[in-house]
Amino acid sequence: MKNNEVKFEDKLKELEKIVDELEKGDTSLDDAIDKYSKAMKLAKECSEKLKKAEENVNKILTEDLKEEDFTVE
């Protein structure tokens, strides 16, 4: 992980904070639009990170140290 890269957990906390603020309904329309846009960006980044993690977990190393997709037969 790069030093300036925000951790998944921090992105998730920020996303939750934005959702809480939007649910209160006391923000201006312009502010709500900005918060919504930021929330969607964070949600996309989190989703991509989870997908990549899932793909990595679903791989196994063979005896000759090659990665293969894990399947149950």
Image (tube, helix red, strand yellow):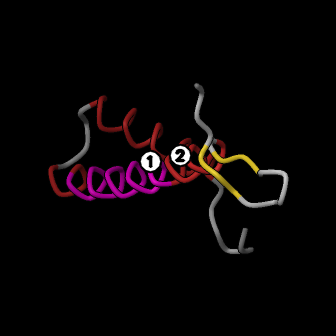
Q: Residues within 10 Å of mark 2 (few under 14, many from 20)?
A: few
Pinpoint residue 61: horizontal percent, then vertical percent: 77, 51
Provide the residue designation for mark 1: 47
Residue in the foreground of this view, choosing between 67 and 46: 67
Question: Looking at the image, which residue is at 74% across and 74% down?
Answer: 3
SS under mark 2:
helix
- Determine whether, in the image, residue 8 is placed left or right of residue 38: right
Provide the residue designation for mark 2: 50
- Determine whether, in the image, residue 19 is placed left or right of residue 71: left
Q: Amino acid at mark 2?
A: Leu
Pinpoint residue 17: horizontal percent, then vertical percent: 47, 39
Pinpoint residue 19: horizontal percent, then vertical percent: 37, 37
Q: Which residues are magenta?
A: 33-48
SS under mark 1:
helix
Question: Looking at the image, which residue is at 58% across and 25% down?
Answer: 73
Q: Quadrant of the N terminus?
A: bottom right
Question: Looking at the image, which residue is at 25% across and 44% down?
Answer: 27
Decide: marks 2, 1 in contact (CB < 8 A)? yes
Q: Is residue 36 shown in magenta?
A: yes
